[in-house]
Amino acid sequence: MIPKFRAWITEGNDMVYPQDDTNVEWTIDDLTGFIAPQENLGGGMWGMYDKYELMQSTGLYDRNGVEVYEDDIVRCSRGCPHRVIWVKEYGGSFLGGMPAWYLSGLNEGYSWTGAEEIIGNSWENPELLEDVE
């Protein structure tokens, strides 16, 4: 799988998906060396966003066929909301055949069933997690 990303632009409160938007592209930030979104300013000019939060696709899809990204809020098969998180201690390693993507607040042993549903994300809908985290 080729990694896919999206970015929450904190100054404009906007989620951008450069793979789906011709006015946004990815570049490498010369200061950090990391991937960064840039916007089409017109006239052949591109400008990097100053403040953004980068999120990677998990490679999973919810029951409606919507791609699941880090920081999405997912209703699990039990009906409760959880944030999709990357467990950094595992550094992206594979444990028991599963990557280090998890739903926050669940006990170990929960497996992605495909019955889960994205109900928002933690940037645009933080209120969905107020009572659970």
Image (cartoon, grey):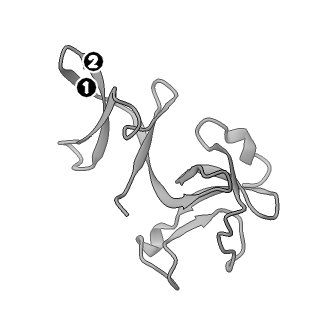
Q: Quadrant of residue 126?
A: top right
Crowd rating for badge 2 (residues with CA inside 10 Å; few <14, some 14–19, many 20+): few
Labels 1, 2: front one: 2
Q: Please give left or right for residue 50 compared with residue 9 in the image.
A: left
* Residue occupying image coordinates x 71% and y 64%: 105
Specify the farthest residue to the bottom: 96
Residue 22 on image: x %, y %: 34, 29
Q: Are marks 1 and 2 in contact (CB under 8 Å)?
A: yes
Which amino acid type is marked by label 1?
Gly
Q: Residue furthest front?
A: 65
- Residue 21 percent coordinates (x, y): 39, 32
**Which residue bears the numbered disc 1?**
47
Q: Quadrant of residue 31?
A: top left
Label located before the other in sequence (1 or 2)? 2
Q: Residue at x 37, y 41 (%)?
A: 19
Helix, strand or loop at label 1? It is strand
Q: Is residue 39 above or below residue 30?
A: above
Judging by the rendered image, the residue that carries numbered circle 2 is: 41
- Callout 2: helix, strand or loop? strand
Mark 1: give few (<14), some (14-19) or many (20+) Cα within 10 Å.
Answer: some
Picture residue at 43% right of the left edge, 38% below the top: 17
Of the pair 56 and 33, the residue shown nearer to us: 56
Q: Please, is residue 58 above or below residue 43 in the view?
A: below
